[in-house]
Amino acid sequence: MNTDFDGLSVECRRYDASVAEHRHDYHQIVLSNCGKMEIEIEGCSGMIDQGQGAFIASSDRHEFCCVDGGMFLVLDISDGQSIGLCHDPDAFGHLTDRKFFRVDDKIRHLASYASAKTMNKDQSLARKAWATLIISELVDFSKSQLSMKARSIHRALEYIDANFSRKIAVSAIAKETGVSERSLHSLFVDHLNTTPHSYIVAKRIEYAMLLLKTTQKTAPEIASLSGYADQSALSRSMQKHHGVTPAQYRQLTRRTD
């Protein structure tokens, strides 16, 4: 830790051992110049290397291990300083949730140049200027990544809404969305707290229940319109998720109207 820390510190640090769990009252961004570091932040494990950095929020419990003498660019940032840098009271909120972030070429080049500047301890203003550039770029990059994820989720939901009444595969949703099936699954779990398959099932049941309540269509017709193979499949699904059959639900809703 830099003993001259006044709200923003940036320096190169070499690590060649394990450090036991600890925490500090400032944020920390760690980027690799060379080497790799295994780190656990609040129970979330990951690797700091040329392609990935880590954000350790104030008071986060963390421990790490680096056995190859790697060199890392470390930025220490106070809460107040982060607001001043980014003009955003929750500048690091999205990074706090994720802990780890992808390092693109621009951030990698900025970090490399800043690392060279940290070797000159007399250039404090220059070093802090480079630190500010890195932080601003990280925040902007992370926000753009979140925007891309939001657009991907929106496209996926639109596709499901338009196609849930027919046979629909998760692979087709992923292709339409422009992401891999694994990424699609992660997007749904992280942002909607469900899986693509569970969302489709919920959408089908929701539509079937609407038709049961508002139309005179038969259960087989409703099953077909809702994306089920037959009435039995609809009935099993409704019983599993809501504890009623189509006929029971129709009776209950008619009774309350």
Image (tube, helix red, strand yellow):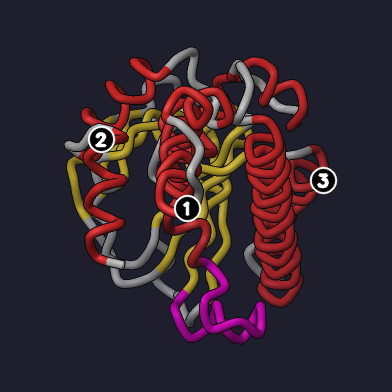
Look at 53% across and 60% down and name the residue there.
75
Residue 90 lies within the magenta run: yes
- Mark nearer the N terminus (1 vs 2): 1
Residue 241, x across and y down, in percent: 25, 35
The answer, for residue 147, to whether it is visible in the render is yes
Asked if 119 appears above or below 65 in the picture, the reply is below
Q: Based on the displayed image, in which of its 4 quarters is residue 253 positioned? A: bottom left
Q: Nearer the viewer, mark 1 or mark 2?
A: 2
Residue under numbered circle 3: 106
Please state which amino acid type lies under the numbered disc 1: Phe
Please state which amino acid type lies under the numbered disc 2: His
Please state which amino acid type lies under the numbered disc 3: Lys
Depth order, front residue of 236/127: 236
> How far is the residue under mark 1 from the one under mark 2?
39 Å
The answer, for residue 70, to whether it is visible in the render is no
Characterize the local packing of mark 3: few (<14), some (14-19) or many (20 or more) Cα atoms within 10 angstroms: few
Characterize the local packing of mark 1: few (<14), some (14-19) or many (20 or more) Cα atoms within 10 angstroms: many
Residue under numbered circle 1: 55
Q: Which residues are magenta?
A: 78-92
Look at 58% across and 30% down and name the residue there.
225
Asked if 174 appears above or below 123 in the picture, the reply is above
Quadrant where the image shows the N terminus: bottom left
Residue under numbered circle 2: 241
For this orientation, the residue located farthest to the front is: 216
- Disc 3 is placed on an element classified as helix
